[in-house]
Structures are given as structure tokens and as C-alpha cells.
């Protein structure tokens, strides 16, 4: 009959109207500035630099100013100047590390190419600014964030990174020991992947809610690069 | 009350005159609507409430719409509704004729001793109008109804395009 | 010269009538001519109401009824007239009355 | 406002008139009517302007709730910082509208562009004059009140056309043409459905029409027109036509945002836009008020026992309920296409309204039937309503149904 569809439609909207008052599953709005939804762990937008010691953020940056990310960045939003001492010798840390987030396209390539796990993706999305040019150009100080913060926003991935770094450090120590004892054989590269699964004791892993077990596929496994001190 | 009448009369005639002289058809149609509304105001002033509302309903509500539709459908160019002003060859005879008619009418009106009653008119309620329409004037009402129906049908037939319906037209 | 209200009403209506007449005669646009005719009809209606109001023997509501009928007929006239204008425009792409001089469409 | 009734009314019922008299009693007799009329105008305007402000908020709130979101709830009260569920939103909107720049296009017809919103608002306010808001609250007692209402309402179409034409914008002009076509089409069923009421009541006066609906069947059932077969059908026709006449969704084609930007409102900004908005809501209120008056018993209480509540409260309650339905419908239905719109008017509503007129005539003629004949009266009238509805509805919806899509 003509009109029955109209009545059905009215019933649907009436149900919504009444339901939004008593049914929290219908009413999905969050009052944004006061209430915030928890971001999913894999959410990412702009990169930041990881440092290890909050007491000395500039000194413990993992970045060695190798400029790989600068070269790989598709929109070329990264600008790095390596710090040098007065004799011109490279100090392996950035003097300038700028990211123009108004240009950045959040592709995460810088994170994937970084051999030192020094640059990671942040979850900070409230970057609105009144300063059109300077406000969106982030400097080293703005970008530098602690490893604990990294554990907070990406717990699973950070645990994997920590484990890999710890293993690398252990291997370096072993290599040093092997150098000291010249007869010792070099450890096979194939053992890396198996040992990476074992959780390494890390001070930051305690704060992370997720168990630092096998890192998921999303967690970048550090590629087999020569250790920085080599 | 006479002042109100003079005001209404002046405004009505003025809007009508300006409307007849304008180049822009839309403006002249809208001014004519104002003029019709002025006539309705005159009816109100004269105490013919029902006629006044009927005048507004028919002229301001319906005829103006038809006029505006006709103007928009027959615009000379797509962008404006300007028309040529009256040419001198037509204006002059028209003015002479109109002036002559006006002179004759005014002379006749002023010169004739019209008997008028001082008493106010009998208040005619809607009920009485209805009874009159259905009683003594029922035949006229039927004729008017038939006339309106025929006129509307004729208007539709005249104005409708004879284009056959497109079979692919969406329902 | 002492003019009664009836005189004033009649003068008003004749002025309106002449405005309509001049408009209908002088303009060449068919719509404006039709509107001029409408004005003349309205002027006639004013007369009817004026005589109903001030006339010597105001019959109960006859003037009002006449005006009502006249309004109805004016509506019919406007509808047919404007339909004709539209039909003329469809044939000639023009509604100047001087050029609407062919009977064959 | 009309003279008080003969028997003394309760205090609450008399309150508005008593207040008005207290305000104007000190004036000489010859001036009092003028002061009274002015007070009525001011009162009506203030009440409906406030209602307009609250309706804009209520509409957004209801639309929000239907879409499972809260609607505007953040504008704080000035200097207090209290949010009060967005109660200050109309205030903020008003200030925004007042302070925005008023832009007139270069090619626009400046005079008409200015005149259109003013005329529209003026005519919409004029329609409020003849609605009886309560037993003693009728701004203007007119013998031909219903005719006056629709005459004033008809003039609003002209204002919409003026707006569309004066903007010199293709979208505006298209909207003006659409508005003309739509308003003419729906004027007819609107008037025809009202004629049925006039037939039954035997009067064009709104106060008489309301008073005729004041009896109670068996001492309990209200005899509003909507509770008769022809009245119910008439009310539905009236309501649909009123939706179209006030340019409300789903008939808001003249200002369809998705097709015509905003139709005749495209070139309006600032305060003129606010005037249009106000006029639209005023038109909605006036038509709802007329619907309440003609079909829903006006200010009459629904049950005799509830008569102690003042009549204007009943009127307000019915008006608000009707306005809520307006918003509910806006929240529910998608917009019609222009050909569907005109087809609905001419092929469905007009024939139904004409048949309904016959039903009403039958109802009036059979008023004296009693006993089993009264039952037959209901059956015949009901069949006269439902039969044409089904037949016409079948024709209207023939060939239409849920569409099936094939993905290429």
C-alpha cells in the first residue's frame, strides 16, 4: 500500500531518536577536546626522533645523521646537517634535523630505511598552528622524543626494536670479545632471525602493556647492517 | 478616512503607470502586482473584505504567477527581460486616445450629480455571500465554473507542446 | 466643486482605466498588452464596488458578487491569454504584436 | 483580541487579556484599540521570534539525535560559561548572522534583492493575525479569516520569485521557477482540503471553526475534524501540501543544496539570509497553526477533564507536536525529484482532495443519521476515503519498487 514504506522510514528514524538517549551503542559521539578515543596502535602520522635518555635528549639521539632518510624521503621534507667538531671531523649526530610536516605525506619510508631505529612515526595529530611557515617546520628539539614515549604509543613495535637493538649490542660485545681472542669464529648471520624472537630484557618493556613476545609483521626488523662502530 | 483613500488611489495609479512605462518586464509585472494589491486595499477600505481577500488570492497569488511564468518563458534573450519601450508612432496615438477617454470620463463624472447615500453599507458577511451565490446567482456560478474549467483546459491545450513523450523518460 | 466620495472613487477608476488603455495601446509586448487589459478590468471592478458602497440603493451584496464573478473571469482571461502568448512565442520566437500577423502557425 | 466570553473564565485563561488590559487601561477609550492591536502584534512577534530561535536549535538537535549524535551543545551562555545543552546556540547564530557581510551581486537587481526578504517576512507575519491562539486570544477577528490566511500566504510565493530573479544567478532563477511551479501545484490541494472544513463548519471564521470542534462524543471523545474520515484524509492532504508550501523537506526543491546550491538563497548572506530563514520558520509555524485550528481542534482540550489547563497551552502543545512532525519528516525522507513532485500534486493529492470534498459533503448531509445509520455513515465515509486512496496510490506507485542493481 502506498505510504507503508514512508511509515517504516519514520519508524526507523523514531527508533534512532529514542535510542540515542538510552542506548550507548547507538550514540557513538565522543566530545572531542574533553574525551578522546584511544588511537589504534598502528596509527601513524608524522615522524619523530628517538632518544634513549630523557635527561640528555640531544646527546642520546639514535640518529647518526647518515642522511639516508633525507635521500629516501619522496616529498623531500627532511633536512639534515651533520654536526662536526672544529677540525671538521664528523661527530655522527645531527646538528640540524628539520622535518616540514606540511610537506610530509606520512609514508613511513624514512622509518623503514633507517638502519639505527632512530626515526619512528608519531601519533600526535593536533599540529594546528597560527604560524603558517615556522609552525609546521619541526626542529631537532621538537622532534626528539624518548624511548619511553615510543613504548607508550607503539608498545609491540617498540619492544621488538628494543630486542633487536639489545641483540645487536650483545653481538657487538661478542665480536669485540672475538677480536680480543683471535681464534674465535664469527657468528653466522643466519642465527639473527632466530634469536630476535627471544625477548630481551629492556627497561622500557616494563611500562608497555603488551607482552614483548614475537614482534608482529608491522614491526620493522632492523636490516643486517654493519654496526655503527664498525 | 478620505486621506487613506487618496493615498491608496495615488499609489495604485502611480504603480500602474510606472509599470506600463518600464522597460524591464519583470519589474513591470511586479509593480502591477503592487497595483493589484492597492486595488485590494481599496476594497478593504470600502468595506468589501471578502472581495479584497479574493482579489489578493487571485491576482497576487495566481495571475501574477502565470504572468511571471509567461515572462520567463518568452524572454527575448536568455539573460534579460528587457523589451523595447513604446515607439513614438504608437505612443502618441495611444496617449491621445487615453487622454481623450480620460477627459470624457472625468467630464462625465464631475458633471453628473450622483446621488449617494450617507449611511454605511450593509455589512455583508461571508455567509450571506455564500447564500446569494447558491440562491439567486446559482446559475451564474455554474456558468462561471464551467467557463473557468473550459478556459483552464483550453489554456493547457494551447500552451502544451505537442512533442511526443520520450519513451526513455524516467517515470 | 464639491466631490462626493463616490465621485472620487469613479475618478480613481477612470484614471486606472486610462492607464491600462494607454499601456495596452502603446506597448508592443503581448504580455504588457494583456496586463493593460487586466488593469482596465480592475478599474471596472472598482466602479462596481464604489456603486455598491455609495450607490443610492445598495442591494445586499450584488456589487460584491459581480466583482467576484469578474475576478473569476479575469483569471480565466489571463490564463487563456498567457497561454496564447506562449503559443505565439513558440511559433515565432517573438511576442511583438506587430510581427504576430500570420494565422498559420 | 476578541471580547471575553459571557461566563467568567478562570484566571489563567483570562491572564493574557487581563495583562493587556492592565497595560492599556490608562489610555483614553479612542486610543485603546490602537494600543491593544499594537500590543497584540508585539506579543505575537515576540512569541514567534522566540519560538523561531528555539526551533532552529530544536531542529538541529532532533536531526542530530536521529543521526545518533548530540547536535549543537557547546555554545556557552555569555559571561557565565554554562553550556546548558546548547541553549545559547540561537544567540550565537544570531550574532553571527548580524555581523556577517551583506553581499549583493554586481548584476543583481538591487531594489528587488532588498525587497524580497522584507516582503517575505512581512507576509509570513501577516498570516499570524487570524490564528486563534486561545479562547480569548485572537489578534484579528475576521469574517473571512481563512481566505485572508491563504491570501497572505499566496503573496509569499511572489517574494521567493523576487529573490530568485533579483539575484541574477542561474541557480536562483531555476529555483524561482521551481518554487513557482511547486507552490502553484500545492496551493490547490491545500485549499481544497481546507474547503472541506469550511463546508463542515459553515464558516470561514477561524474562531467559529474551533468552537464547532468543542463538543465531546459520549462525553469523552473530542469531536475534532481529524477524528472523522474526511477530516483525517483532509488533514493528511493539508499536511503534505503544507510541507510543500513551506518549502520543507522532502519538498525543499527550490533550495535543494545538492542541485541548486541553495536556490533563491544562493546570493543572500548576512541578515537578509537570516530574514529568509526566519520567514521559512514563520511560514511553517503559521501553516501548522492553521492545521491545528482547522483539523486538530485548535485550543480545545482533548478531554473534558483536562479543561482546567488554559486553552493557549493546548494550542501551544498541538503546535509544537505538529512542528516536531515537520522535523521528524525532514530527518527521514529524501528529497523528491521535480517531476515526482508535480505528479504527486496533480495526480494524487488534487483528485484525493476533490473526492474528500464529496466525502465531507456526504458527512454534512448525513449529520442527522442516528442508530445503525450512524454506523453506515462511518462505513460509507471511510470507504469514500480509503477506496480512492488505494486506487490512486496503486496508480501512483505502479511500476515502482525497490530497485535491483547489477554490478558490471
Image (cartoon, coloured by chain):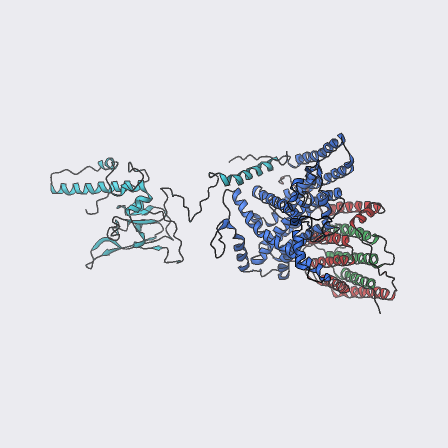
Chain colours: A cyan, B red, C green, D blue
Q: Position of residue A225 (x, y in %)?
A: 24, 43
Foreground pick, D202 / C62: D202
Residue D149 placement, left or right of D69: right
Above/below status of A190 relative to D69: above
Foreground pick, D327 / D117: D327
Instruction: Work out which residue is located at the far bottom of the displayed protein and give it.
Output: C1
Foreground pick, C39 / A224: C39
Residue at 13% over, 42% down: A179
Above/below status of D1 relative to B105: above
Residue at 19% over, 47% down: A229
Residue A183 placement, left or right of D118: left
Residue D298 placement, left or right of A12: right
Q: Position of residue A194 (x, y in %)?
A: 24, 35
- Tell me, yes or no, if residue B162 can be seen here: no
- Tell me, yes or no, if residue D317 can be seen here: yes
Task: Quadrant for the N terminus of chain A, please.
Answer: top right
Q: How many numbered marks, from 0 up?
A: 0
Q: Position of residue A98 (x, y in %)?
A: 32, 54
Q: Position of residue D393 (x, y in %)?
A: 66, 36
**Residue A183, located in which quarter of the rendered image?**
top left
Amino acid at each position: 500500500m502506498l505510504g507503508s514504506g514512508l511509515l517504516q522510514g519514520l519508524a526507523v528514524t523514531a527508533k534512532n531518536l529514542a535510542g540515542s538517549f538510552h542506548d550507548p551503542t547507538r550514540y557513538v559521539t565522543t566530545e572531542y577536546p574533553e574525551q578522546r578515543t584511544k588511537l589504534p596502535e598502528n596509527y601513524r602520522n608524522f615522524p619523530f626522533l628517538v632518544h634513549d635518555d630523557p635527561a640528555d635528549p640531544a646527546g642520546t639521539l639514535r640518529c647518526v645523521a647518515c642522511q639516508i632518510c633525507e635521500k629516501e624521503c619522496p616529498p623531500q621534507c627532511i633536512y639534515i646537517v651533520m654536526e662536526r667538531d672544529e677540525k671538521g671531523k664528523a661527530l655522527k649526530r645531527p646538528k640540524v634535523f628539520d622535518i616540514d610536516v606540511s610537506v610530509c605525506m606520512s609514508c613511513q619510508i624514512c622509518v623503514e630505511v633507517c638502519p639505527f631505529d632512530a626515526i619512528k612515526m608519531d601519533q600526535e595529530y593536533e599540529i594546528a598552528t597560527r604560524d603558517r611557515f615556522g609552525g609546521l617546520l619541526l626542529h631537532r628539539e621538537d622532534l626528539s622524543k624518548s624511548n619511553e614515549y615510543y613504548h607508550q604509543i607503539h608498545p609491540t613495535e617498540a619492544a621488538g626494536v628494543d630486542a633487536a637493538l639489545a641483540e645487536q649490542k650483545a653481538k657487538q660485545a661478542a665480536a669485540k670479545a672475538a677480536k680480543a681472542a683471535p681464534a674465535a669464529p664469527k657468528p653466522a648471520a643466519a642465527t639473527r632471525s632466530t634469536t630476535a624472537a627471544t625477548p630481551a630484557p629492556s627497561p622500557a618493556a616494563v611500562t608497555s602493556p603488551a607482552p614483548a613476545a614475537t614482534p608482529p609483521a608491522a614491526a620493522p626488523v632492523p636490516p643486517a647492517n654493519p654496526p655503527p662502530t664498525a | 478616512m478620505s486621506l487613506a483613500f487618496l493615498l491608496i488611489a495615488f499609489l495604485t495609479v502611480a504603480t500602474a503607470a510606472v509599470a506600463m512605462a518600464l522597460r524591464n518586464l519583470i519589474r513591470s509585472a511586479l509593480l502591477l502586482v503592487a497595483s493589484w494589491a492597492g486595488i485590494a486595499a481599496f476594497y478593504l477600505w470600502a468595506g468589501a473584505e471578502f472581495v479584497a481577500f479574493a482579489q489578493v488570492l487571485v491576482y497576487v497569488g495566481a495571475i501574477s504567477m502565470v504572468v511571471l511564468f509567461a515572462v520567463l518563458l518568452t524572454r527575448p534573450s536568455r539573460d534579460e527581460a528587457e523589451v523595447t519601450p513604446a515607439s513614438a508612432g504608437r505612443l502618441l496615438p495611444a496617449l491621445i486616445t487615453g487622454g481623450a477617454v480620460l477627459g470624457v470620463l472625468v467630464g462625465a463624472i464631475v458633471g453628473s450629480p450622483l446621488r449617494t447615500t450617507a449611511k454605511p453599507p450593509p455589512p455583508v458577511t461571508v455567509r450571506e455571500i455564500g447564500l446569494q451565490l447558491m440562491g439567486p446567482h446559482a446559475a451564474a456560478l455554474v456558468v462561471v465554473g464551467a467557463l473557468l474549467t473550459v478556459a483552464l483546459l483550453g489554456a493547457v491545450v494551447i500552451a502544451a507542446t505537442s512533442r511526443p513523450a520520450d519513451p526513455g523518460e524516467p517515470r | 466643486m464639491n466631490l462626493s466620495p463616490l465621485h472620487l472613487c469613479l475618478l480613481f477608476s477612470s484614471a486606472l482605466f486610462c492607464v491600462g488603455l494607454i499601456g495596452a495601446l502603446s506597448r508592443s509586448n503581448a504580455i504588457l498588452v494583456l496586463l493593460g487589459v487586466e488593469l482596465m478590468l480592475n478599474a471596472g471592478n472598482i466602479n462596481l464596488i464604489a456603486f455598491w458602497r455609495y450607490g443610492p440603493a445598495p442591494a445586499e451584496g450584488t456589487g460584491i458578487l459581480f466583482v467576484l464573478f469578474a475576478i473569476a473571469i479575469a483569471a480565466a482571461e489571463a490564463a487563456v491569454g498567457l497561454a496564447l502568448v506562449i503559443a505565439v512565442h513558440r511559433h515565432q520566437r517573438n511576442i511583438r504584436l506587430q510581427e504576430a500577423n500570420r494565422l498559420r502557425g | 483580541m476578541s471580547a471575553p466570553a459571557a461566563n467568567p473564565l478562570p484566571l489563567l485563561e483570562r491572564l493574557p487579556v487581563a495583562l493587556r488590559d492592565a497595560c492599556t487601561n490608562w489610555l483614553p477609550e479612542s486610543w485603546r484599540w490602537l494600543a491593544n492591536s499594537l500590543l497584540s502584534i508585539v506579543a505575537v512577534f515576540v512569541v514567534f521570534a522566540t519560538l523561531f530561535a528555539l526551533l532552529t536549535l530544536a531542529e538541529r538537535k532532533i536531526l542530530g539525535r536521529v543521526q545518533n549524535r548530540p547536535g549543537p551543545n557547546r555554545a556557552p551562555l555569555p559571561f557565565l560559561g554554562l553550556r546548558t545543552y546548547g541553549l545559547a546556540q540561537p544567540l550565537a547564530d544570531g550574532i553571527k548572522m548580524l555581523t556577517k557581510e551583506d553581499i549583493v551581486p554586481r548584476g543583481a537587481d538591487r531594489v528587488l534583492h532588498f525587497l524580497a526578504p522584507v516582503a517575505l517576512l512581512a507576509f509570513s507575519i501577516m498570516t499570524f493575525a487570524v490564528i486563534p491562539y486561545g479562547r480569548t486570544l485572537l489578534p484579528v477577528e475576521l469574517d473571512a479569516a481563512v481566505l485572508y490566511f491563504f491570501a497572505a500566504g499566496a503573496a509569499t510565493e511572489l517574494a521567493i520569485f523576487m529573490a530568485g530573479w533579483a539575484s541574477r544567478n542561474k541557480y536562483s532563477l531555476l529555483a524561482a521557477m521551481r518554487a513557482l511551479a511547486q507552490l502553484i501545484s500545492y496551493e490547490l490541494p491545500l485549499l481544497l482540503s481546507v474547503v472541506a472544513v469550511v463546508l463542515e463548519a459553515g464558516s470561514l471564521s477561524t474562531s467559529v471553526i474551533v468552537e464547532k470542534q468543542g463538543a465531546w462524543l459520549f462525553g469523552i471523545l473530542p469531536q475534532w475534524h481529524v477524528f472523522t474520515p474526511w477530516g483525517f484524509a483532509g488533514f493528511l492532504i493539508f499536511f503534505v501540501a503544507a510541507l510543500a508550501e513551506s518549502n520543507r523537506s522532502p519538498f525543499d526543491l527550490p533550495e535543494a543544496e545538492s542541485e541548486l546550491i541553495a536556490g533563491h538563497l544562493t546570493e543572500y548572506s548576512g541578515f537578509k539570509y537570516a530574514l529568509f530563514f526566519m520567514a521559512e520558520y514563520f511560514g511553517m509555524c503559521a501553516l501548522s497553526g492553521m492545521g491545528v485550528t482547522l483539523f486538530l481542534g485548535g485550543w480545545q482540550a482533548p478531554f473534558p477533564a483536562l479543561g482546567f489547563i488554559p486553552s493557549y497551552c493546548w494550542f501551544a502543545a498541538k503546535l509544537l507536536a505538529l512542528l516536531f512532525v515537520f522535523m521528524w519528516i525532514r530527518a527521514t525522507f529524501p528529497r523528491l525529484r521535480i517531476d515526482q513532485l508535480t505528479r504527486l500534486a496533480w495526480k494524487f493529492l488534487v483528485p484525493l482532495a476533490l473526492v474528500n470534498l464529496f466525502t465531507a459533503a456526504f458527512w454534512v448531509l448525513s449529520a442527522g443519521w442516528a442508530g445503525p445509520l450512524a454506523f453506515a455513515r462511518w462505513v460509507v465515509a471511510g470507504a469514500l476515503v480509503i477506496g480512492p486512496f488505494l486506487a490512486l496510490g496503486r496508480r501512483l506507485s505502479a511500476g515502482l519498487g525497490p530497485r535491483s542493481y547489477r554490478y558490471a
